[in-house]
Image: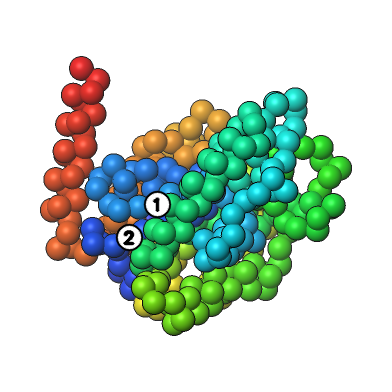
Amino acid sequence: MKLQTPVTDERCSVSISYDDRIMMLGSCFSDNIGRQLADFGFDVCINPFGTLYNPVSILHSIEMLLGEGHFTEEDAVDVGAGSGLVCSFSHHTSFACREAGEFLDKSNTALDKAREYFRSCNKVIITLGTSWCFRHNASGRIVSNCLKRPAAEFTRERLTVGEAAGYLARIRQLCDKAAEERGGFAEKQFIYTVSPIRHFKDGAHGNQLSKSTLLLAVDTITDEGKIEYFPAYEIVMDELRDYRFYAEDMFHPSLQTTDYIRERFLTWALPKSEHSRLEENIRAFRRSQHISKH
C-alpha cells in the first residue's frame, strides 16, 4: 500500500560537483539549502544582497554583479517602523545599519566580493519565491524589499507568465553575452527551483496564482544542458503533503523537510562518483557540531 505520491525527477542535465563554484540567489529557501551545501564542503556564494523573492529583483541583482557601479548615498533609504536603520531597496533588511556610511561599506564590500565570485562561478541556482512585486511609486522601479515603509509608497502587482519568463530569459542572455565578450568570465549553467514556502499574505488563491506563474515561466525557459528545473515545490506539496513537515508557523518547511529536499537535490544533481565524498563531508560536519556543543 502506497501512502504518498512520490515525485519522480530524472537525472539532471546540469549537474553540480565539488569542483564547481556555485552562486545561489533567491528566497530564504535558497539560504537554507545554500548553508547546508556550504556546511558539506561545496564552494558556494549565498545571496550577496540578502533574500530576494521575485524575478525582477533577481535580474536586478545579476545586473549589479555584471556591472561596475557601487551603491551610493542616493541608494540609502530609511527603514520604516521607527527602526532608526538605513538600507536600500535592492537589499534585504539583514543589510540594514544605523548609519548610511556603515550600510554603504557593508553592501559595497559584499558586492565587490560577490562580483569577483560571479566572474568565475559556473553554476547559478535560483529559487523563486513569488511573482507578486511592489513598485515604488516615486521612482517607478520594482523593489526587492519595501523596508517596512508606508504601503502608500508602493503599488502591488503580479507579473504575467510572459513578463516573468522575459526577466528570467534576460538573466541567461546577460550571462552568455558576458562569457562571450569578457576574458576570464565563466560560462554559466542554471538550476531553477520554486520555493515551497507559501505566501499567505497574498491569500491562498493568490499564492497559488503566484506559484503557478513562476512554474510556467521557468518551464518556458528550460533548456536541456543549460537551464534545469528541480521540483522542490512539487516534492513538498505532493510528496510530503503534511503539516508535520512544516515549522511552527505552518508556512516554512521544517528542518527535517529542508534536509530531505537537500538529499533529493544532491541525489538528482550530484554525480554518483562524488557521493562517497559527500557522505564523508556530512560525517565530518556532524562530528564538528558534536565537538562544538561539548
Q: Residues within 10 Å of mark 2 (few under 14, many from 20)?
A: many
Q: Type of residue at label 2?
A: Arg
Q: Residues within 10 Å of mark 1 (few under 14, many from 20)?
A: many
Rendered position, 58 above or below 167:
above
Left/right placement of residue 71 relative to residue 158 reads left
Q: Is residue 289 visible?
A: yes
Residue depicted at 54% across the width and 48% down the height: 108
Residue depicted at 25% across the width and 45% down the height: 40
Q: Type of residue at label 1?
A: Cys
Q: Earlier in the sequence, mark 1 or mark 2?
A: 2
Left/right placement of residue 3 relative to residue 18 reads right
Residue 196, image x, y percentages: 51, 49
Rendered position, 111 above or below 32:
below
Towards the viewer: 222 or 113: 113
Q: How is the image coloured?
A: rainbow
Res 174 → quadrant: bottom right
Judged from the image, the secondary structure of the residue bearing numbered disc 2 is strand
- How far apart are labels 1 and 2 at the CA level? 8 Å
Residue 27, image x, y percentages: 53, 49
Residue at the spot of label 1 = 45
Towards the viewer: 4 or 203: 203
Judged from the image, the secondary structure of the residue bearing numbered disc 1 is strand
Left/right placement of residue 117 relative to residue 95 reads left
Residue at the spot of label 2 = 21
Q: Quadrant of the C terminus?
A: top left
Rendered position, 68 above or below 232:
below
Count the marks: how many? 2
Left/right placement of residue 278 relative to residue 181 reads left
Asked if labels 2 and 1 touch by Cβ distance under 8 angstroms, the answer is yes
Looking at this view, name the residue that lies furthest to the bottom: 180
Residue 286, image x, y percentages: 21, 34
Residue 49, image x, y percentages: 54, 48
